[in-house]
């Protein structure tokens, strides 16, 4: 069993197909011949792909003329090699390999099929050939157009002046591995970004989200009318065929006048022109009118009395 797994793993590594990107067909033929076919779950038009085959004789008798042949159903998929063959396979024996294919750049997007034909001849008592066993197997191939790169942003519904807000980005590649990735955040002139606005990654694996968390700081300039600010996020990368590509997204965020009371994302509170930080204490409250300071002192005394009563 260990040998079985190691051989199959070697086939997948050679063919460049990882288990996360592949679909599997498993079948047991007459004579206890186990067959595993690995193929990509999707292929980008104009790209090459491979189908990996592993056959093991788990029966009591030898087999001869073990053949696996694959033919394309249309001209959108071209076979580079179509046949795998073993002259004889004894009890416990196995063999495997890969068949390579290419897709046309203008291939029809959608579901296609490869027609695989498996056959072998069982040797009764390891000597007498029996009638050939043959079976057809359909291998689905999903051809996609351009690779799908999901660029998602999470922002507040609105922002106001002289405050700080989160601006989060999630980047996911649905179809391919991305290399030499660069993510740039281009803010409007009304705001600045806390920290860096340019991020680089040597590689981003397929279906592996990359999260970027940033903070937007608005200018202290008084805002009298609400209007939308355009943020642009640009992503450049190298795809699996070595071609450099760029995708971008513009995110409009509403900038509006601040109301009398505003709660910030970190738990602070704006009261008119005065800001109460989430960690505020009596010694750090500065610039608050005497009336507001007096009311805060009363509230604190009330809280202290409640705590003493509970004790």
Image (spheres, rainbow, N blue to C red):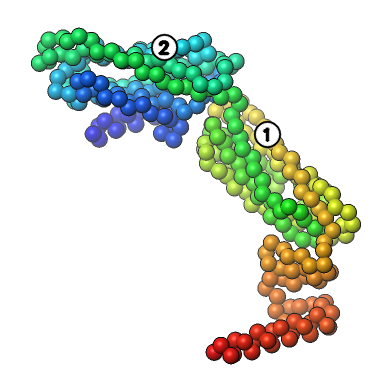
Instruction: Identify the image quadrant of the N terminus.
Output: top left
Disc 1 marks which residue? Answer: 247
Q: Residues within 10 Å of mark 1 (few under 14, many from 20)?
A: few
Residues 284 and 63: in front is: 63
- Report the front residue among 56 and 185: 56
Find disc 2 in the rendering and name its residue: 71
Crowd class of label 2 (few under 14; some 14 to 19; many from 20; radius 10 Å):
some
For residue 215, above or below residue 118:
below
Considering every residue shown, the one lying at the far left of the view is 125
Q: CA distance from mark 1 to mark 2?
A: 37 Å
Q: Closer to the N terminus: mark 1 or mark 2?
A: 2
Residue 5 horizontal side relative to residue 130, left or right: right
Seen at 83% across and 51% down, the residue is 190
Query: On the picture, is 140 further left or further right than 224?
Result: left
In the figure, 233 relative to 267: above or below? above
Mark 1, secondary structure of its residue: strand
Residue 197 placement (x, y as % from top left): 70, 47
Q: Quadrant of residue 8?
A: top left
Is residue 199 visible from the viewing direction of this image?
no
Q: Position of residue 227 (x, y in %)?
A: 84, 49
Secondary structure at badge 2 equals: strand
């Amino acid at each position: 069993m260990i040998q079985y797994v190691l051989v199959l793993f070697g086939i997948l590594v050679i063919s460049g197909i990882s288990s996360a990107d592949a679909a599997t067909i498993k079948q047991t033929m007459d004579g206890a011949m186990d067959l595993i076919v690995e193929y990509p779950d999707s292929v980008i038009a104009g790209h090459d792909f491979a189908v990996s085959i592993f056959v093991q004789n788990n029966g009591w008798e030898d087999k001869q003329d073990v053949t696996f042949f694959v033919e394309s159903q249309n001209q959108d998929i071209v076979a580079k090699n179509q046949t795998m063959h073993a002259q004889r396979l004894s009890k416990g024996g196995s063999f495997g390999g890969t068949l390579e294919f290419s897709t046309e750049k203008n291939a029809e997007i959608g579901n296609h099929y490869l027609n695989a034909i498996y056959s072998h001849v069982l040797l009764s008592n390891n000597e007498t050939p029996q009638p050939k066993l043959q079976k057809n197997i359909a291998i689905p191939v999903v051809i996609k157009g351009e690779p799908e790169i999901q660029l998602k942003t999470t922002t507040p519904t609105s922002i106001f002046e002289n405050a700080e807000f989160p601006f989060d980005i999630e980047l996911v590649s649905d179809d391919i591995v991305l290399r030499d990735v660069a993510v740039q955040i281009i803010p409007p002139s009304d705001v600045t970004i806390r920290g860096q606005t340019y991020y680089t990654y040597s590689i981003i694996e397929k279906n592996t989200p990359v999260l970027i968390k940033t903070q937007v700081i608005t200018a202290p300039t008084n805002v009298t009318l609400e209007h939308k600010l355009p943020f642009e996020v640009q992503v450049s990368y190298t795809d699996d065929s070595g071609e450099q590509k760029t995708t971008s997204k513009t995110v409009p965020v509403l900038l509006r006048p601040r109301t009398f009371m505003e709660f910030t994302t970190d738990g602070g509170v704006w009261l008119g022109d005065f800001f109460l930080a989430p960690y505020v204490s009596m010694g750090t409250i500065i610039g608050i009118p005497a009336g507001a300071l007096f009311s805060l002192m009363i509230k604190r005394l009330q809280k202290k009395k409640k705590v003493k009563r509970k004790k």
